[in-house]
Image (spheres, rainbow, N blue to C red):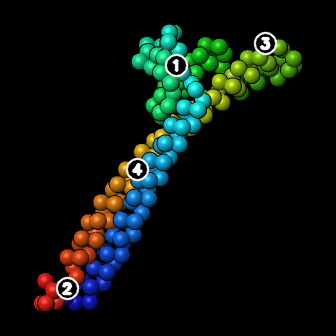
């Protein structure tokens, strides 16, 4: 075996070993991140109402929000309620109306506060939903890197020359 094969084997072995170490770390971080999201969502004690949900959310009736999918569904529930309460207007649009009215319209001020709270809650739930997806990605990449690292280490081992005494 020439020097280039030996160097290739060494390089593959080194990269493979690094991936075999990095992969499980990513798996662990993905799983611990998911656990943290579950813990934080559960601590909020958000529960879907038993009745009054739109048809597309009926399956969530009475359930607690503890997963990314449930956080997304509840964010959609808030979105619908908020659109109903504000006539489809956003916080920015209501703020502009309030400013145009001189800033002393009590109903618009209350509506602006409702829009602010609803959009803030929705944004928080959407962040949990996005973080849930990131933990899935990190966990999947960790598994893939672990497998790839093991394959590279095995390939490097196959490229390593064997002495006649040590087959």
Dots 1 and 3: beta carbons under 8 Å? no
Mark 4 or 3, nearer chain start: 3
**How far is disc 1 from disc 3 in space, using C-alphas?**
28 Å
Q: Position of residue 116 (x, y in %)?
A: 70, 26
Mark 1 or 3, nearer chain start: 1
Q: Position of residue 41 (x, y in %)?
A: 55, 33
**How far is disc 4 from disc 2 in space, using C-alphas?**
35 Å
Instruction: Please tell me which residue lies in front, 64 or 90.
Output: 64
Tell me the residue that label 4 is attached to. 139
Q: In which image quadrant can residue 43 be found?
A: top right
Tell me the residue that label 2 is attached to. 161
Horizontal arrangement in the rendering, residue 127 relative to residue 147 (left or right): right
**How far is disc 1 from disc 4 in space, using C-alphas?**
29 Å
> Could one spot residue 130 in this view of the protein?
no
Question: Is label 2 in a helix, a strand or a loop?
Answer: loop
**How far is disc 4 from disc 3 in space, using C-alphas?**
48 Å
Question: Is label 4 in a helix, a strand or a loop?
Answer: helix
- At horizontal 54% and vertical 37% (from top left) the residue drawn is 39
């Amino acid at each position: 075996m020439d020097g280039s094969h030996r160097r290739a084997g060494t390089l593959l072995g080194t990269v493979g070993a690094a991936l075999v170490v990095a992969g499980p770390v990513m798996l662990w971080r993905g799983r611990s991140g998911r656990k943290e999201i579950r813990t934080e969502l559960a601590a909020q004690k958000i529960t879907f109402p038993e009745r009054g949900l739109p048809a597309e959310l009926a399956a969530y009736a009475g359930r607690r929000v503890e997963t990314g999918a449930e956080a997304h569904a509840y964010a959609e529930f808030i979105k619908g309620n908020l659109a109903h309460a504000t006539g489809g207007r956003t916080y920015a649009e209501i703020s502009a109306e309030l400013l145009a009215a001189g800033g002393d319209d009590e109903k618009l001020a209350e509506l602006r506060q409702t829009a602010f709270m609803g959009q803030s809650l929705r944004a928080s739930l959407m962040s949990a939903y996005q973080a849930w997806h990131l933990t899935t990605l990190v966990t999947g990449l960790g598994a893939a890197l672990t497998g790839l690292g093991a394959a590279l280490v095995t390939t490097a081992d196959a490229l390593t020359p064997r002495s006649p005494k040590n087959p």
